[in-house]
Image (spheres, grey):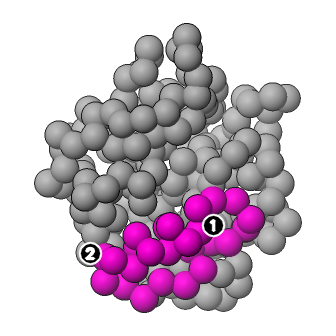
Amino acid sequence: MIAILDYGSGNLRSAERAFALAGHEVVVTSDAKTCLAAEGLVVPGVGAYSACMAQLLEISGDQIIADRVAANKPIFGICVGMQILFTRGLEKSGAHGLGVFAGEVSQIAAPILPHIGWNTVEVGVGSHLFAGVEDSAFYFVHSFAAKTAVEGAINTFCNYSENFLAAVESAHVVATQFHPEKSGAAGARLIKNWAESL
């Protein structure tokens, strides 16, 4: 079973449909026991970094994620759900993140923001997540991103005026800055790749 963490931020229903297509039972929930017991936990996120963190803390989502990390149980972060896995977000006055990955999330140095649309990525060597879709384009909508490679992880980059992290794959935690649930067949394949690893 895959649990999609409901903390009031994210495209919950589109994520639910997309992950269900990978052949797993999917439940949208904020229940800690269900989230810990699930084979995989999806952490979505849309909007401002600080607002997402505040909403996450309201349901003790930080503890849910920490417990899964400590237990080496798989997590998939999407968009701001990826960003809050880092140490800090610099949007507005800044906010502390979860520190699962070391690094900061800052504004992209581009003349037009937000970055909206389809982009290809430079897939990190050894990626399982992107198997079969290495040359595909994925759908992005964001103005902020992490830009420094995560040590000990497979790092996939995208370029929009500057390089930023499009995805990170560690032993048990993966995350994408783009929306796989909105990325058509390529996104569906990427989700399936992750679901098959559970």
- Kind of residue at disc 2: Glu
Q: Image height check: is 90 above or below 10?
A: above
Residue at 73 percent of width and 67 percent of height: 7
Dot 1 falls on a residue whose secondary structure is helix
Q: Image height check: is 105 above or below 179?
A: above
Query: Residue 69: horizontal and vertical position, in percent?
Result: 55, 66
Specify whether 154 is left or right of 117. Answer: left
Instruction: Kindly tell me whether residue 103 is visible in this rendering.
Output: yes
Which quadrant of the view contains residue 187? bottom left
Residue at 40 percent of width and 70 percent of height: 18
Q: Nearer the viewer, residue 35 or 144?
A: 144
Q: Mark 1 — residue?
A: 65
Give residue 196's mark. 2
**Neighbourhood count class around disc 2 (C-alpha, 10 Å): few under 14, some 14–19, many 20 upward:** few
Specify whether 57 is left or right of 135. Answer: right
Give residue 183's mark. none
Dot 2 falls on a residue whose secondary structure is helix
Q: Image height check: is 94 above or below 67?
A: above
Q: Range of the magenta residues?
A: 4-28
- Kind of residue at disc 1: Ile
Question: In terms of sequence position, does the residue under pointer 2 or pointer 1 come before the other?
Answer: 1
Instruction: Kindly tell me whether residue 197 is visible in this rendering.
Output: no
Which quadrant of the view contains residue 34? bottom right
